[in-house]
Image (tube, rainbow, N blue to C red):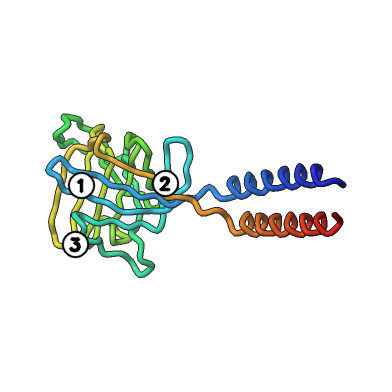
């Protein structure tokens, strides 16, 4: 097999390796921030699975309010919940949106974030029980047809407003090249070096 065919074969193999590595790992790390109208900022990070505009399976969650880190659980992560309307328990109290609708219940593990912010539905909190005792939390969601942003820091500071997607920011952190790809590239360079040396020796 001549050198041209070897390089062609190597190129195809490399492309297949990279494609397989990318498809096999659909979980990424993200950094996010939300700037309240009064200038206060909640920022942090999490790991999640990207699906179009949505990011699901949120884990490894961190958050801080104005630079002060939230308390986390023993694993160093906040718990993730989502706002789920409880249609069997109507809330007859009129809210600021003027909507009278179902009470909201918190569902564990189904938190969702979105790139444009319009589908955000999450509560990041330091307790496994949102109805119990907790120190700090950050939530964006809609229980009554009105999206709200709420944050309470570990110093007891509280901020709340109608959510604005324009002030929501999220970005995927750079994805490192898989170790298998680096190993393949270094092997390829070594192979090319050996072949070049043989060619020069033959001359």
Q: Position of residue 148 (x, y in %)?
A: 22, 40
- The dot on residue 154 is 3
Q: Position of residue 195 (x, y in %)?
A: 79, 56
Report which quarter residue 68 is drawn in: bottom left
Q: Nearer the viewer, residue 121 or 164?
A: 164
Q: Residue at x 27, y 35 (%)?
A: 165
Q: Position of residue 14 (x, y in %)?
A: 68, 47
Q: Position of residue 95 (x, y in %)?
A: 15, 35
Q: Secondary structure at mark 2?
A: strand
129 w.r.t. 23: above or below: below
Judge left or right: residue 79 versus residue 193.
left
Report which quarter residue 53 is drawn in: top left
Mark 2 and mark 1 lie on one chain; the one further toward the N terminus is 1
Q: Residue at x 33, y 60 (%)?
A: 128
75 w.r.t. 116: above or below: below
How many angstroms separate mark 2 from mark 1 (CA)? Answer: 23 Å
Q: Nearer the viewer, residue 140 or 64?
A: 64
Q: Secondary structure at mark 3?
A: loop
Between circles 3 and 2, the one closer to the viewer is: 2
Task: Please report contact status of discs 1 and 3: CB closer than 8 Å, yes or no.
Answer: no
How many angstroms separate mark 3 from mark 2 (CA)? Answer: 27 Å
- The dot on residue 150 is 1
**Viewport quadrant of the C terminus:** bottom right
Task: Please report contact status of discs 2 and 1: CB closer than 8 Å, yes or no.
Answer: no
Q: Nearer the viewer, residue 167 or 195?
A: 195
Judge left or right: residue 67 versus residue 78.
left
Q: Secondary structure at mark 1?
A: strand
Considering every residue shown, the one lying at the far bottom of the view is: 74
- What residue would you read off at disc 2? 172
Considering every residue shown, the one lying at the far front of the view is: 203
Q: Residue at x 75, y 57 (%)?
A: 191
Task: Please report contact status of discs 3 and 2: CB closer than 8 Å, yes or no.
Answer: no
């Amino acid at each position: 097999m001549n050198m041209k065919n070897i390089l062609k074969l190597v190129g195809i193999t490399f492309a297949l390796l990279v494609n397989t590595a990318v498809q096999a790992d659909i979980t990424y790390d993200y950094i996010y921030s939300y700037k309240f109208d009064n200038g206060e900022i909640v920022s942090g990070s999490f790991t999640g699975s990207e699906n179009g505009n949505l990011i699901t399976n949120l884990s490894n969650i961190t958050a801080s309010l104005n630079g002060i880190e939230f308390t986390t659980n023993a694993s160093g992560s906040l718990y993730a919940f989502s706002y789920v309307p409880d249609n069997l328990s109507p809330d007859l109290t009129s809210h600021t949106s003027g909507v009278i609708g179902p009470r909201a219940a918190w569902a564990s593990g189904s938190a969702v974030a979105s790139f444009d912010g319009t589908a955000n539905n999450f509560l990041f909190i330091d307790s496994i029980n949102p109805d119990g005792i907790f120190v700090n939390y950050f939530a964006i969601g809609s229980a009554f047809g009105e999206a709200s942003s709420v944050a309470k820091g570990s110093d007891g500071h509280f901020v709340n407003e109608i959510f604005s997607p324009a002030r929501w920011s999220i970005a995927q952190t750079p994805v490192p090249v898989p170790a298998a790809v680096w190993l393949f590239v270094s092997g390829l360079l070594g192979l090319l070096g050996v072949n070049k040396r043989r060619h020069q020796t033959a001359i």
